Amino acid sequence: MLAGNSYMLLGSQLRFPFSCLKPESHRKKELYRAREPPLTFQLFTRRRRFLNFDRKIIGNGVRFEGPVMDVKELEKIEDDDLVVETCIVRTLPPALTLEDGLQSINEAVEQLKLNPPSSSGMLRFQVAVPPSAKALNCFCSQPVSSAIFPLFFLSKERNNPTYKSLFLNRTGGVFGIGAAVYFTDSSSCFPRSESLIKRYLSSDSIFASIYGFVDINFDTKSSPVKHDAGSFYFFIPVIELDEHEDVSILTATLAWSDSCLCSFEDAILSYELAFCQVRSHFLPTTERFHSKHVRSAIRKLNMVEDKTVEMVSVKALSLGGSNFGADPTGIPFFLREAPSFCQFSFRFSPTVGVASNMLDHASELTSSLQDHVNINSLWASLVVEECSRLGLTYFCIAPGSRSSPLAVAASHHPLTTCISCFDERSLAFHAVGYAKGSHKPAVIITSSGTAVSNLLPAVVEASQDFVPLLLLTADRPPELQDAGANQSINQVNHFGFFVRYFFSLPPPTDHIPARMILTTLDSAVHWAMSSPTGPVHINCPFREPLDGSPEKWTFDCLKGLDIWMSTAGPFTQYMRVQHSHACFSNIYGSGQITELIEIIQAVNKGLLLIGAISMEDDIWAALLLARHLQWPVVADILSGVRLRSIFYTCPEIVENILFVDYLDHALLSDSVRRSLQFDVIIQIGSPITSKRISQFLEECFPCKYILVENHPCRHDPLHLVTHRIQSSIMEFVSHLLKVHVPHRINKWCGYLQGLNKMVAQEISFQICTEHSLTEPHVMHVISKALLPESALFVGNSMVIRDADMYGCNWANNQDLTDTVLNSELCFNWIRVAGNRGASGIDGLLSTAIGFAVGCNKRVFCLIGDVSFLHDTNGLAILNQRMLRKPITILVINNHGGAIFSLLPIADRTEPGVLNQYFYTSHNISISKLCLAHGVKHLQVQTKSELSDALFTSQHEGTDCVIEIESSISANATFHRYLRKFSCQAADHALGVLSRIPASNWCFPCKIHGMEYSLYRLQLRTPPTSSSVDHGHSRFYREGFILSLTLEDGSVGYGEVAPLENRQENSQDVEEQIRFLFHATKGAKISYSLPLLKGSLSSWIWSHLGILACLLFPSVRCGLEMAILNAFAVSQDSNLLNILHHQTENEGEIHKRSSSVRVCALLDCSGTPTEVAHVASTLVEEGYTAIKLKVARRADPVEDAAVIQEVRKKVGHQIELRVDANRNWTYEKAILFGSLVENADLQYIEEPVQDEDDILRFCEESGLPVALDESIEHCQENPLNTLFKYSHPRIVALVIKPTVIGGFERAALIARWAQMHGKMAVISSAFESGLSLSSYILFSYHLELQNAEICKVMDRKAAPSIAHGLGTYSWLEEDVTTSPLGICQNPSTGYVEASVAKANRLLQKFQINQSIVHRTFKGQEVLKYQLKVDSNDFSCIINALETGQRTDDSIVFLHGFLGTGEDWIPIMNAISGSARCVSIDLPGHGGTKVQNHCREGAGLDPTLSMEVVADLLFKFVQHITPGKVTLVGYSMGARIALYMALKFSDKIQGAILVSGSPGLEDIVARKIRRATDDSRARSLVAHGLQFFIETWYAGGLWKSLRSHPNFNQIVAKRLLHGDLHSLAKVLSDLSIGRQQPLWEDLKQSKTPLMLIVGERDAKFKAIAQRMCREVENGQINREDPSYKHCELVEVPHCGHAVHLENPLPVIRSVRQFMTRYVNVL
């Protein structure tokens, strides 16, 4: 920090003894003096007059205290003198360019001026703009005579930044201008009138960042800056550009307060001045790179540098607390520990400023040209200096004698960063990588001879891929050419047409003006950066001496360099006349553009193809174009958007952008290729990687093919392009965004979405199912290791193809800023690069390292082993870690060239020839190579090892090589499986989707409604799953029949049959069904649902707003059954056909019997002879398989005797299974196994109690085992759980859909089993014929599927499986009037289930009314109003009521901004047993409040907690004479708690959802009162929409924002009509005005339940303390075991528990009522 009581000034006003800012003597004449006149703007104000604004504005914003609230200070302040201002935030749609963003904000401000707000407020406009670094250039572009201050650039680089880093690579940071708000400590001297009111910023202002300094005092009136320990200066800029890794945020902040002498008019003037200056002074977006402007711009400021000063940036969100400690100087610890930055440039005023790590001190170089010892040194230094002025500061130097002058000059220059390597080829590729990453050329310096030739591969790559490079090749002078001189070759035009420009300099001489060197460099770089960009070559001959030996030269050659030496810019300024976006049509002519627009507007089936894109702004533009067109999008791996991090708010397809990521593998299906046809294709970016897609596009021809490229070269290998646009992507997109493009919702897009999803799921399934580490798995998971601050470099050959085919996007719980700003794009992208110019495998490692330097990101490099070995010299460069982040290199080591195993040559060539001449098999140790170069090496062979290695590499600050062991043959086999299964998946999807009428895609069918009936079936004998009650002679099975009706009249039936001993009970289940009754009404049916594979789970979440995993398994199974059956009826099909599409190639499968074998079920109670007799009878009936229940006896020896007797009786042709239901210990199971090892059991189901003993039993006994209970509790993605059960002795998985959770999960588990060669046995759980019919069809579908799997994997066809559907024989009666077709097949003599009969039963299903006990068809919600009076208020309360009219009622109270309708889904769920009433609280919804006081009678009475509670108490008295239970959320929870404590005679219990007893701290209450008063004022001043945007942007609602119903919730909040009443309630019912109830809690006798969300840390802590307080108050009571307070933590949700996850809330309410109130 600054030392002493010194001042920080510029120019002649610099005061001493500020020693650290004292200028060096030789720089005094360069100190800044403000001589230029200030700029003058004409600004229009709301007074409709023009003002000539010619004065400087220096920090002329609203003064705030703080930024941290001082507790002691606040204790002394009266409420009227405390203002806590809330910043209202408006988020505007993403802008294409920074210029567009500025214009968007300005239009919003102009609208604001038409309706000026009240006397005080704070408003912030923000817009997402492209992410490329522009903040530094914005700062440098501002005029020296700026009209508004402060003005700053803050670099976000935290890793020892230097001035070199400004020029080396991307420097992201913050640009700010003006001070809308400034913060000072209370000791600052201000007029008394200003200091009376203490103004603070609310913690609601979460988007605002505060910038400034600690221990710095800046007086905005007199402009001195001085060191003052304990003081600070912080502010919020008027205009701010904040750059993040994936997006930049442009904001404008307006703050005004008449009491602070800063009116709204003043705020507008400050904004307009800042806006005009910024808009008029910044480099255009089309400028390729800007670092060449930075140096000269910073020099003009003549800033004083002090590296001891650090700038601080604090999020306003962190400033809302009051309990902050302070250090001895009085600075809060929070500010001392806030993020500080040591690279910035800050101008307080025209004459005051400071910089840190921004100044280069390079002026000494240009002032000492005459000091060079020889002419070679002079020329070399001029070359390097001009390069630096052109922005080229990265020098790649190869060792050599002839290039010594250039190497020495480059190494001595203060701005250059130099790297060297003994291998010119690796060095040149490294330069290519740097240019790819930084978008500006690297400079390569080599010696003469073959050193130059070694550059050729990299030059070719750069030329083909339009990568700019500057080649400085040293050479022999002319007299040594063609004379046999050592290391002398002809270097003239050495690279031919692969360079854009060549010039051979003469040998250095003082007879040639030095200006020639400068203009040559300027011309070469201009060629390199002009379209088509690429490498340029300057040949540099040198004569002796090559070292620093002195040799006379004359200064005449320096003539004309005076101006150049006094500035920091290049000698020749190349200026481009920029075409505005609006004039795009002028480039081509209006006729051509009109034709293009007509083609796009008339499109029927359009495709947007995004090829390789290197510029972040172009990626941004491509995404905006995709959103605008709403065409299907195919994105190449190098596009940057192929690996997307999708926000948690958008786990489904991104809104308005349909990415078809897996089109490559979908096209493996001939049916898909024939069905797809595009009529217009727009390609932006370089050619794509996928050969299969390219061939398909050729098949689409003739069509309109529009190619957009920013160079004149032809990139059209298939000769398809019909319209070629030579334009930047930004310019092209800017024009199209202004054109209306019709959006056609059609079957076409639905096809592509379904195809893509099906293929994606299949690829993911196959990769996850394969337990070995495969190469596609590496590509599938690498994206999840990538963060926004990461980048990916992919090698060539097999690696990039795998990445393109198998790379995937993933869900990401993004931080608040990105979630809100990118709400219209819904994802981040990852920058990806590769060498696809010539697509060679040479130099890839070196390129990746250079890319890491240039992009300034943490790079992951994916590369093959042959490519790695081809460039091991790149490891020498890796060791020179200069100004870059760590790099992780993943080497896929399959010991050869694996790509040839996937080409046709592999099938036609001998293995020996393949290994030697194609695979080039090797056994080279990569680990020893890394050891030799001192590089960390990790070797992995399993999936878990790869995950661990990636984690290690991410959390260590070192470079790392991860070697991934693979095999060419295994890789080829797995790729073959992936292709075949993907083809099957595509065929299946197409078959299912093609049956849907086209009209249905445009108007998706909705669910009209749902009914359910409770049935009770009599059983012949007790179920084997229950203990026998000998006191009963009759046994029953209860469940529910769902009837789901679509809008087209189609009806589907499903069965919910809970097993009481499976943690489900009928009451809980029925409540969930009643909830679904409400939630499903009006929900759109997705036509991808029959595809399963996640479709149903996604639909339940996205359309019903609940996580599928939270539905009871039986409920989910019944819901899925009803939906699938309704879908089948709607398509005039059946369940089997929509689950399994029959293809022409399944002739063999069709020949299979259209029936399902059934396994009989037998209880082993009785003697061995008795059981054997029953088994024999079953065999006579036609059963070919029998499962016997064992482990019911105390001794397993007895069970073994039974099994032996049964086997003896039925013979070995009958399949015998036994089921122990986890009843044996390991020892008993082993004993049983030893006794039946010769009984030829098909399997033993669940033999041991402990899951961990299963594999142990398999190994020890050697017997086949089946799983049942072990898979029941698999999570939503059970593959991770199943992974450990791939043991070969586990031969079967017994799958009960009603227990496992439906058809989708059952299908996934079954497919996993079939892939691993295990039996997938579908088993019933004593359900009715309805479920059994569905299971029969599902089982048959699995049989067909297994046959397909065997065919693909070249296995012997598996025999049919006897499925566990024998429970049908237990049914004495059924829910259907038609008999189920499980009987002996006359043609086979076996008991089988007929597929045809099962189909007919489902299609003609009729409920047997004799078994129906009751039917629920809906319940009316009664609406009424009641008038109640209390003190000064009358209130007409709007109420909603449903359920039975009983003496005990439940009253629901919503939170702020809610209404009684928020509770309707929960009320409907529990209304079957309770009377439920919800009300609109005062000020909300339809409830009206009237004040009885007359006008002018004094202060308005407040709607205090006491008043509102009294009103509600009287309402309760009106509706019931008895007691009620209150359920309240947030504000409603506070009211409910107050009433429970104060009106215990009327309130029998309270359930508090995210509630609080209030604030104990006096100061905290004072702050909260002021905050809520400010919120109330903002609500009235800015309207409900802006208020709600700001309200729900808070951290408390992060989880709610990720909920699929969030937009619907917000829409309902916008319906409030009486803003003044709403604002009054917000203020009057503020928790800051409520007296805390903590002490009252200790005396509470009313039962309480506290419900909180697991993600709501704040209210979890409050609830835990509340429980402790209640428990402490109960210690001395009569019955300490009686629990008055219960805490329930609800998973997967935050603060708004009842909206985010209502199912656990429903269950908790019922349990509370049962436990404490005994209503239910």
Image: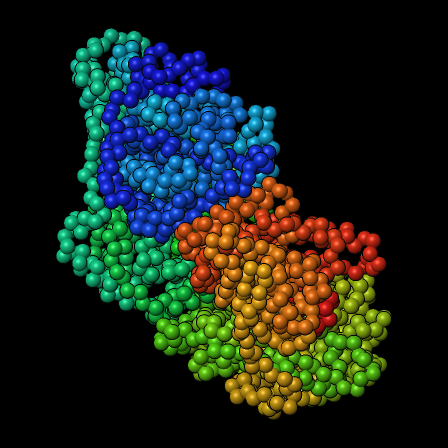
The total number of labels drawn is: 0
Image point (42%, 48%), residue name: 89
Choose between 174 and 12: the one closer to the eye: 12
Specify whether 87 is left or right of 509: right
Q: Residue 1118, position in %: x, y?
A: 58, 75
Residue 998: which quarter of the image? bottom left
Q: Residue at x 22, y 52 (%)?
A: 725
- Identify which residue, 1261 or 1253, lies in the foreground: 1253
Query: Residue 202: horizontal and vertical position, in percent?
Result: 50, 43
Say left or right for 276 vs 764. Answer: left
Asked whether residue 857 is in view, the answer is yes
Is 1539 left, or right, of 1121 in this rendering?
right
What residue appears at the point 83 percent right and 75 percent down from the top-left corner?
Answer: 1201
Judge whether residue 961 can be spotted in this image. Answer: no
For the point 83% across and 83% down, the residue is 1031
Q: Position of residue 464 (x, y in %)?
A: 28, 43
Report the coloring of the rendering.
rainbow
Q: Nearer the viewer, residue 1698 or 1680?
A: 1680
Picture coordinates of residue 376, whole percent (x, y) = 27, 16
Q: Is 1459 in front, or is 1351?
A: 1459
Quarter location, residue 1293 = bottom right
User: In the rendered image of this protein, does residue 513 appear above or below residue 691?
Assistant: above
Q: Is residue 442 above or below residue 486?
A: below
- Looking at the picture, does residue 845 appear above or below residue 1464? above
Quadrant showing the C terminus: bottom right
